[in-house]
Amino acid sequence: MEIPVIHVTHGFRCGAMHYGRVRLSCGVRRMANMHANERDRVILSLLDEHGFISLRDLTQWVDTSSATLRRDLERLRMSGKLTRVRGGVQSANGTDRNGGSPLRGVPFHENVHLHRGAKEAIGKAAAQLCRPGDAVIIDGGSTTLQMCSHLEPLRLQVFTNSLHIVSALLPQQHTRVAIPGGVVFREQNIILHPFDDTTTYRFHASLMFVGAAAVTRYGLMKNDVMQVQAERKLLALAEKVVALVDSSKFSASAAHSLCELSRVHTLITDRGLDETSAKLLKSHDIEVITVDAGRKRR
């Protein structure tokens, strides 16, 4: 079943969102240096969304030799996780998962209520970094969502993968909104497309506002490898990255690095930031903005 395109005015294009099978792009990018368990995760995640993947697309997507890929597919077939068919593989039950499976991590409807006061103050501070008329990317997340109520006077051009953010911005008459094409992940209410999307590459942003499941010495961390792969493409479209993370994220853990700390220009957090984490950020020359009950401090 196909859901309607959300038409975007003022010259922006908006891709259609589909439930069920999505045509895979021929221009996919490879994920380098993947271990066997991570290759399995990617293959099964793609099957869960698309139902069928051609061997050609898999070869382009998974950075390994054809022989290794065949062994991976045979191992997954023997364990009952997929079925080999002519020209490719399909999910074990032979059908698409209509609407897709949830991403790993806390569902949005739960996460939005965690540390709500800090998130609201962080969102307000983030909005103050935008200049009138800016083109920005706002990554889906419970903290980035808190920016939206402060953006209407700025007449921004916003690219976002979040349906929650789209919903918050639609009433703002002078805020232009664009979204990528892809698959809707219901629990997080975001749109992801791990393959090349020509609509995405036409956008250039001065700032990208992004959240994280954790912040460690390895960078901004996310829980799901599919989410990371899709959102890394958005990072490439922005001049500067602004991280919006409450202080609890510095003691959290997550498996996949979205980007290194050296890619982050500014980080906004609350007064709970500990000294060790503050030194880590300083060592990467990150501008840190701390907030308290809506007030911004440097």
Image: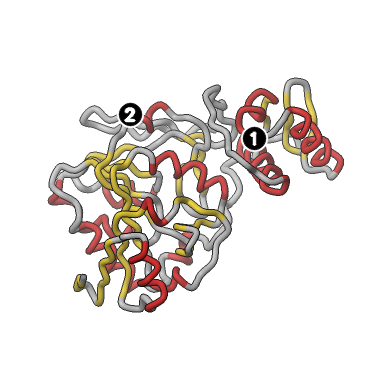
Say what amino acid the circle numbered 1 marks.
Answer: Val
Between 132 and 284, the one nearer to me in the picture: 284
Q: Residue at x 46, y 65 (%)?
A: 111
Quadrant of the drawing holding the N terminus: top right
Q: Position of residue 122 (x, y in %)?
A: 28, 66
SS type, badge 2? loop
SS type, badge 1? loop
Q: Residue at x 34, y 38 (%)?
A: 237
The residues tagged by marks 1 and 2 sit, at their Cα atoms, a distance apart of 26 Å
Say what amino acid the circle numbered 2 marks.
Answer: Arg
- What residue would you read off at disc 1? 62
Q: Point out which mark residue 202 bears.
A: 2
Q: On screen, 56 above or below 263?
A: above
Residue 262 is left or right of residue 183, and the answer is: left
Q: Residue at x 37, y 78 (%)?
A: 275
Quadrant of the drawing holding the C terminus: bottom left
Q: Position of residue 32 (x, y in %)?
A: 59, 39
Choose the circle earlier in sequence order: 1 or 2.
1
Q: From this viewpoint, which residue is outermost toward the front? A: 283
Residue 178 is left or right of residue 97, and the answer is: left
